[in-house]
Image (cartoon, rainbow, N blue to C red):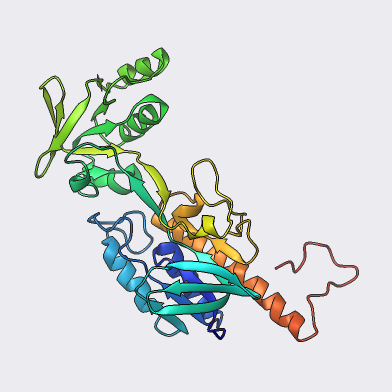
Amino acid sequence: MTRDYDVVIVGAGPAGLTAALTLGGAERRVLLLDGGPPRNARATAAHNVFTRDGCAPTDLKTLGLHDLKPYDVTVLHTPAREAKPFEDGFAVRHDGGWARARRLLFASGVRDKLPHIPGLRERWGLSVHHCPYCDGWPNRDAKLGVLGSHQEGHHLALNVRAWVEEVSLLADGPDELTEEQREDLQRIDVPLYTQPVVRISGKDGVTVHFRNGKCLDLEGLFLNPTQVQNSGLPATLGCELDAKSRVTVSENGMTSVRGIWAAGDMAGAPQYVTNAAASGMTAAVSLNTTLIHEDVRARGAAFHKSPHEDPQVGVA
């Protein structure tokens, strides 16, 4: 194998696309491995995206890929299948073979693990949502429900209530709330349902079917699903994960493994399109800075400081 790229980026969501744009503009040779549709592909629109508010997530991706055309960025529509250290860089296997690079940047995202309630997955991204900052405004006049228990359900219900007048908390069994949390719900007029949910139906809205035979008609539902890494490669390479299975990174996106960066949802960035994109740029700049230093050293030079300069002046 010969060294083909400066950087391999795994994942072509907002974080990966922005990292590719940044590194392409830094005159790096980049391989971007696009593993498939974005996590929010089923959503009809992305909100709070500067200059693109309301744009469909798939259209955002198309625009992002188009922006890469002037640069030395190769896009392959394949996931990364395997990755391993190789001399002073990394080797990555994809559906077309192997590629080598000096650095590796993961932006492969997370996968939502939804509750096993029949009918829920089919409505995910359509009438069942995750984030009120993304889908609160389109549902501002709707009658909504929040599916969840204990503190997480309590907090999400209080948040969603800021967008709409009618919200119900569906605990799907014992609510695991404190008495004070139940009083919170009463104070802001959020009814609490503790009957187990057996299925979800409805074409335009959401009908919740409880085990006791009763139903609740809603126009939308919010929940916070648990999440897992979309790719197992960071863990295989030895990258440290936190208690929520997110890849642990520094403020600049550096993982615990030298030469590997991570960005976007997989690294715990606030899960909004703009934040993911910002973390992609931050990681790309940090990564490129190490390449600059490496290239300068290879030519016998270094970023030497002036003897009497403030230590923070000129720090890259």
Q: Is residue 215 above or below residue 309?
A: above
Q: Is residue 275 visible?
A: no
Q: Quadrant of residue 176?
A: top left
Is 241 situated left or right of 109 in this image? Answer: right
x and y, in percent, of residue 93 in the image: 46, 73
x and y, in percent, of residue 303 in the image: 78, 75
Residue drawn at 45 percent across, 63 percent down: 15
Q: Can residue 115 be seen in this view?
A: yes
Q: Which residue occupies the foreground of this view, 84 or 64?
A: 84
Q: Which residue occupies the foreground of this view, 301 or 255?
A: 255
Is 240 situated left or right of 41 in this image? Answer: right
x and y, in percent, of residue 293 in the image: 71, 75
Q: In which quarter of the image is the C terminus?
A: bottom right
x and y, in percent, of residue 104 in the image: 55, 69
Q: Which residue occupies the foreground of this view, 223 or 188?
A: 223
Residue that sits furthest to the top in the current view:
179
Q: In this view, does 200 lie above or below 177?
A: below
Is 209 situated left or right of 87 in this image? Answer: left
Q: In this view, does 306 lie above or below 144?
A: below
Residue drawn at 41 percent across, 15 percent down: 180
Q: Quadrant of the N terminus?
A: bottom right
Residue that sits furthest to the right in the current view:
307
Residue drawn at 37 percent across, 58 percent down: 49
- Give the total of numbered labels: 0
Q: Quadrant of residue 215?
A: top left
Is 173 situated left or right of 270 in this image? Answer: left
